[in-house]
C-alpha cells in the first residue's frame, strides 16, 4: 500500500528542526561548494539571484561577492539574521525574505538565477519544490544546486540516523536530488540543458569524536534525533556514527579528514 505523508505537517516540523541548535556553526564551515557553484553559474553583476533555503547565507554571500542583486530566502528567521550580519560585516548587498521553498513568494520569472546549496533538497514535497524553482526563474535563466548524492558520507549519516529514528513513511530520500534520473523527473521538459558535476566536500575536524559532538550540539536534525532516544539509544547511535566517520576518514594523525560526494547542478530554464 502506498503511504502518502502529510507534507504540510512535515514542513512545519522541519521548520522547528532547522531552528534547533545553531546552523550558522554548520553553514560557516561549508563555503567552498557555494563559491564553486556561483562560478559554474557564471553569475554576472546586477543579475537577480534567489538563494532558496539560504540558511545563514553562505551561497547568498558568494553571489553577492559577484555584485549580484541577491535575495536570501529561508523559513527560519534567525538564520537570515545571521546572513544579514555577515553581509553587513563584509559590506555586501543582500536582502532577505522569510518563505518556504515549496511556495516561493515571488512572481513568475522574477530571477535570472535561482540557487540552493544543500537547502531545497530537504523540502518534503520534492516535485512542488522543483516546480517553484523553475517558476520563479526566467526563461533562459539558470537553476544551480549542490545536493548530497546517494552513498556519500552525508547520505550514510542520513541512513544511520534513520536506522535509529525512522523517517516518516512515504517520504523520499533527499539524496535523490543528487541523481540525474531524479533531477530529470523533477524538472522534465521545462529545462533546455542540465549539467551535473560530481564534486567532493571534505569534512575536517580535530577528531571523529569532535565531529560527532559538534553535529550533536549544533545541527538541528542530529540534535533532535539524539533527543528522541533514551541513553542506551543515544550510545548506539553515537557508536554507529563514529564507525561511519572512521570508515570514511583518511587521516592517520588522529584528526578527521573525510570526503563526501555531492552533485553540482546547473540547469537552464527553457
Image (tube, helix red, strand yellow):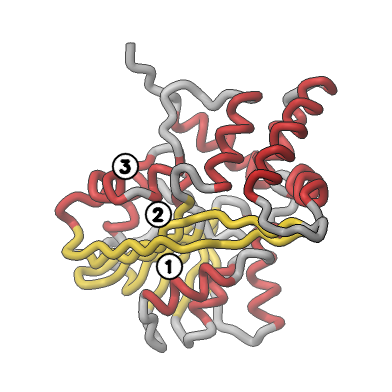
Disc on res. 104: 2
Q: CA distance from mark 1 to mark 2?
A: 10 Å
- For residue 267, what is the image quadrant? bottom left
Near mark 3 (Cα within 10 A), the count class, few <14, some 14-19 or many ≥20, is some
Label 1, on which residue? Answer: 50
Q: CB atoms at circles 1 and 2 under 8 Å apart?
A: yes
Nearest the eye: 146 or 11: 146
Nearest the eye: 231 or 251: 251
Q: Secondary structure at mark 1?
A: strand
Q: Position of residue 146 (x, y in %)?
A: 45, 60
Q: Secondary structure at mark 2?
A: loop
Of the residues under marks 2 and 3, which one precedes in the sequence?
2
Disc on res. 73: none
Is 90 placed above or below 153 here?
below
Q: Residue furthest front?
A: 252
The residue positioned 21% from the left and 72% from the top of the image is 140
Of the residues under marks 1 and 3, which one precedes in the sequence?
1
Nearest the eye: 73 or 197: 197
The residue positioned 68% from the left and 45% from the top of the image is 245
Nearest the eye: 137 or 3: 3
Residue 206 in view: no
Q: CA distance from mark 2 to mark 3?
A: 14 Å
Q: Secondary structure at mark 3?
A: helix
Of the residues under marks 1 and 2, which one precedes in the sequence?
1
Amino acid at each position: 500500500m502506498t503511504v502518502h505523508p502529510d507534507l504540510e505537517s512535515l514542513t512545519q516540523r522541519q521548520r522547528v528542526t532547522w531552528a534547533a541548535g545553531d546552523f550558522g556553526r554548520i553553514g560557516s564551515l561549508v563555503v567552498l561548494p557555494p563559491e564553486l557553484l556561483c562560478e559554474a553559474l557564471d553569475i554576472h553583476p546586477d543579475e537577480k539571484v534567489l538563494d532558496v533555503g539560504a540558511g545563514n547565507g553562505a551561497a547568498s554571500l558568494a553571489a553577492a561577492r559577484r555584485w549580484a542583486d541577491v535575495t536570501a530566502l529561508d523559513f527560519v528567521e534567525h538564520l537570515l539574521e545571521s546572513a544579514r550580519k555577515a553581509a553587513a560585516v563584509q559590506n555586501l548587498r543582500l536582502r532577505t525574505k522569510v518563505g518556504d521553498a515549496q511556495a516561493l513568494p515571488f512572481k513568475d520569472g522574477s530571477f535570472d538565477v535561482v540557487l540552493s546549496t544543500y537547502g531545497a533538497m530537504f523540502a518534503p514535497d520534492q516535485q512542488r519544490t522543483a516546480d517553484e524553482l523553475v517558476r520563479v526563474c526566467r526563461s533562459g535563466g539558470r537553476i544551480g544546486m549542490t545536493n548530497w548524492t546517494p552513498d556519500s558520507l552525508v547520505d550514510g549519516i542520513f541512513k544511520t540516523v534513520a536506522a535509529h529514528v525512522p523517517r516518516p513513511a512515504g517520504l523520499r530520500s533527499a539524496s535523490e536530488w543528487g541523481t540525474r534520473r531524479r533531477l530529470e523527473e523533477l524538472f522534465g521538459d521545462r529545462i533546455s540543458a542540465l549539467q551535473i558535476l560530481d564534486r567532493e566536500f571534505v569534512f575536517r575536524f580535530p577528531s571523529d569524536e569532535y565531529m560527532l559532538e559538534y553535529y550533536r550540539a549544533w545541527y538541528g536534525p542530529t540534535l533532535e534525533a539524539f533527543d528522541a532516544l533514551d541513553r542506551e539509544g543515544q550510545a548506539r547511535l553515537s557508536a554507529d556514527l563514529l564507525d561511519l566517520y572512521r570508515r570514511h576518514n583518511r587521516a592517520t594523525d588522529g584528526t578527521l579528514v573525510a570526503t563526501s560526494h555531492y552533485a553540482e547542478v546547473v540547469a537552464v530554464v527553457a
